[in-house]
């Protein structure tokens, strides 16, 4: 079980900051358990009074010590009814006190578990933000969401089971067993042989359970992925009439998911009945053996045997709960494993070997025999060399899959070259820290992402020292000012998820305003492919022209206007740089570009 010990250790890192709460829960539970046992010990004088025994407190050393010192003065064998009344009042008091303590510890336990899970979620989210691009291409959105929500909640159960219930159960078991041994060690031994047997016999089942739960966690992620796909791809599904096929895919997956839990349930539900059966064996053993002690050996008081039996019966519940802890913990540990899988993946910064925090960009950005391959695939870029002078606008063209996106992802080091190098003023990008490099680069992408926040926050995007004057200037330059002013609350209008309140052209102009505001010397522009109406197109194009001014730009170009005005066009074909030059040069050459141009742009009638 060493793997799970590692997990416990790592979970403990999250519990440690809240350990004072843990101590609080443990001590309150212990105190409550003492009152619990005590309230049942009070049954002994009650029973003796009821059966008109000459002595209300039996001769047993420990019991008489406990009862004699605490309530002895309230008992009088001559006044049975009076003694009974006193005992009943005491039982009520003890039970009330115990329950107040249980409630208090529950409060603290709830805080403890919620705070621990909150910290876990924070850590996961913070880590997620810093994982390298490659991690996101290798992991599905649904899996990520499921780790963030379901797995953190499941991991919480570890804390719940452990803190609120297990500590309470343990306290009950320990205090009950203690008094049982004090009353009769022979009888206690007889009843307790079975306990370790129970725990041991459950072990192989538990190991299987943990594996099962981990598999189910992955399945859950797959299902979340499907839901996410359906929501984001609903247009496509509807337009291709793929509802039935999608539904079938889901039904199959979902059936396997349910079946998996049914299979796990077969194992998980075994621990309860097994414990219960063993409990019954315990009770019978006690009755048989205890009756001998009372009737034959006469070493045990009758009232003590009855109370003893009640103790043992009271033991069953916490013992059963404890026996289920490992099963419940298996699921949580499987979830914890999935969480730590993410937290343990190295972040971009941890892998960053760059030390140059103040790079310059005065002359050029150069690709020097750059090859890049995704994993073991054939290279997506092979031996690409070119140099972009400062201020140059470079258009990248090529068929889909030619490697355009891969090339621009290399500039902010979202990806690192497999071989060759990229230099900024002659300095290898790898020697520049990610922070410094990315403060030089900005992106306006085809898939304009707006966050569920105000227009202001979306344009300022994390910059705190932005004045309204700067915001207005950026919006004006991006041709976004007039529609922003027309929004119900202007700059303070909330855009809703993914900016769904805005048209495509408006979203693009906001993205351009965002880039203008951050004013990066190197700009990556992934032009939108979707057609806009003529007016919108004109507004966007104007905004783009202003954005390009004075910057070094890499643009994945779809608009003819952008391409014609580019200082240089790089033509990519299956990862290779096959041609470069101006629009006129390349057309005159009548090669790859001319073919592409004929195919892509003449069709639109431009
Ligand atoms: P373009 O932007 O020109 O359409 P890309 O740079 O996206 O081309 O893709 C170039 C090649 O790399 C394609 O063959 C594509 O299938 C592959 N590719 C792109 N992204 C990934 C990825 N995350 N993992 C594996 N292969 C990829």
Image (spheres, grey):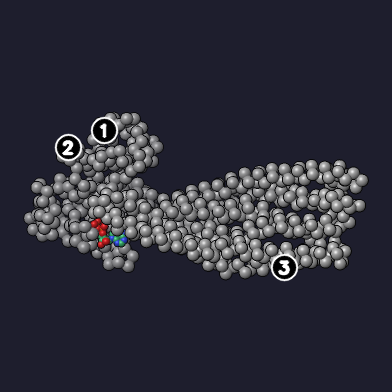
Determine whether label 3 and label 2 are within 8 Å by CB.
no
Cα distance, mark 1 to mark 3? 79 Å
Q: Residues within 10 Å of mark 2 (few under 14, many from 20)?
A: few
Instruction: Give the residue drawn at x 11%, y 58%.
Output: 595
Q: Quadrant of the N terminus?
A: bottom right
Q: Point out the tag, 3 or 2, that comes first from the N-terminus.
A: 3
In the drawing, does residue 466 fall left or right of residue 327?
left
In the drawing, does residue 407 fall left or right of residue 28?
left
When asked about the image quadrant of residue 498, the answer is top left
Q: Position of residue 247 (x, y in %)?
A: 33, 56
Q: Residues within 10 Å of mark 1 (few under 14, many from 20)?
A: few
Of 25 and 561, the residue lying toward us: 25
Instruction: Give the residue drawn at x 22%, y 60%.
Output: 402
Tag 1's secondary structure? helix
Tag 2's secondary structure? helix
Camera sees residue 502: yes
The residue that mark 3 highlights is 193
The answer to whether the beta carbon of the residue marked 3 is less than 8 Å from any atom of ligand 1 is no
Q: Position of residue 27 (x, y in %)?
A: 70, 49
The residue that mark 2 highlights is 535
In the drawing, does residue 27 fall left or right of residue 75?
left
Of 472 and 273, the residue lying toward us: 273
The residue that mark 1 highlights is 483
Q: Residues within 10 Å of mark 3 (few under 14, many from 20)?
A: few
In the drawing, does residue 586 fall left or right of residue 407?
left
Q: Position of residue 187 (x, y in %)?
A: 79, 64
- View quadrant of ligand 1: bottom left
Instruction: Say which mark, if any, is on residue 215.
Output: none
Most distant residue in the front direction: 51
Cα distance, mark 2 to mark 1? 14 Å
The answer to whether the beta carbon of the residue marked 1 is less than 8 Å from any atom of ligand 1 is no
């Amino acid at each position: 079980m060493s793997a799970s010990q590692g997990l416990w250790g790592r979970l403990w890192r999250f519990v440690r900051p809240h350990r004072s709460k843990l101590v609080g829960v443990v001590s309150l539970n212990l105190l409550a358990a003492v009152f619990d046992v005590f309230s049942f010990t009070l049954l002994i004088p009650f029973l003796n009074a009821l059966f008109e025994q000459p002595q209300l407190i039996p001769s047993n050393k420990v019991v008489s010590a406990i009862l004699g010192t605490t309530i002895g003065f309230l008992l009088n064998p001559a006044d049975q009814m009076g003694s009974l009344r006193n005992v009943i009042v005491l039982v009520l008091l003890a039970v009330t006190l115990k329950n107040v303590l249980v409630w208090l510890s529950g409060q603290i336990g709830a805080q403890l578990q919620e705070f621990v899970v909150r910290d876990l979620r924070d850590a996961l989210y913070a880590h997620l933000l810093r994982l390298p691009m490659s991690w996101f291409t290798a992991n599905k959105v649904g899996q990520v969401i499921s780790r963030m929500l379901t797995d953190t909640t499941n991991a919480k159960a570890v804390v719940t089971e452990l803190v609120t219930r297990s500590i309470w159960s343990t306290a009950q078991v320990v205090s009950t067993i203690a008094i049982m041994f004090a009353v009769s060690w022979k009888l206690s031994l007889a009843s307790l042989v079975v306990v370790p047997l129970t725990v041991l016999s459950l072990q192989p089942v538990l190991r299987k359970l943990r594996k099962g739960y981990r598999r189910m966690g992955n399945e859950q992620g797959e299902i979340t992925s499907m839901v996410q796909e359906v929501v984001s791809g609903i247009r496509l599904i509807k337009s291709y009439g793929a509802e039935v096929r999608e539904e079938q895919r889901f039904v199959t997956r979902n059936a396997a998911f349910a079946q998996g839990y049914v299979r796990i349930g077969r194992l998980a539900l075994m621990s309860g009945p097994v414990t219960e059966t063993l409990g019954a064996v315990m009770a019978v053993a006690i009755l048989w053996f205890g009756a001998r002690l009372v009737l034959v050996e006469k070493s045990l008081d009758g009232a003590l045997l009855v109370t003893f039996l009640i103790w043992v019966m009271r033991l069953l519940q916490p013992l059963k709960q404890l026996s289920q802890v490992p099963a419940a913990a298996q699921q949580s540990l499987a979830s914890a494993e999935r969480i730590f899988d993410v937290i343990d993946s190295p972040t971009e910064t941890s892998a960053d070997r760059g030390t140059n925090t103040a790079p310059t960009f005065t002359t050029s950005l150069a690709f020097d025999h750059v090859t890049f391959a995704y994993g073991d695939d054939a290279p997506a870029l092979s031996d690409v060399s070119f140099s972009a002078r400062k201020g140059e606008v470079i258009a990248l063209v090529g068929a889909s899959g030619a490697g355009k996106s891969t090339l621009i992802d290399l500039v902010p080091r979202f990806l690192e070259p497999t071989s060759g190098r990229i230099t900024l003023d002659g300095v290898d990008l790898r020697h520049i820290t990610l922070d410094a490099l990315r403060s030089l680069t900005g992106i306006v992408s085809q898939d304009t992402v707006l966050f569920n926040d105000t227009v202001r926050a979306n344009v300022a995007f994390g910059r705190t020292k932005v004045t309204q004057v700067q915001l207005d200037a950026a919006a004006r330059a991006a041709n976004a000012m007039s529609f922003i002013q027309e929004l119900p609350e202007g700059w303070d209008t909330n855009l809703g998820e993914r900016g769904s309140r805005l048209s495509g052209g408006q979203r693009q102009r906001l993205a351009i305003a965002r880039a203008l505001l951050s004013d990066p010397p190197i700009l990556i522009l992934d032009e939108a492919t979707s057609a806009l109406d003529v007016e919108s197109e004109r507004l966007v194009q104007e905004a783009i022209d202003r954005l390009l001014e004075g910057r070094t730009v890499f643009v994945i170009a779809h608009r003819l206007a952008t391409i014609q005005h580019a200082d240089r066009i790089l033509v990519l074909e299956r990862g290779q740089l096959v041609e470069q030059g101006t629009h006129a040069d390349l057309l005159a050459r009548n090669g790859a570009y001319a073919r592409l141009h004929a195919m892509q742009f003449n069709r639109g009638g431009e």
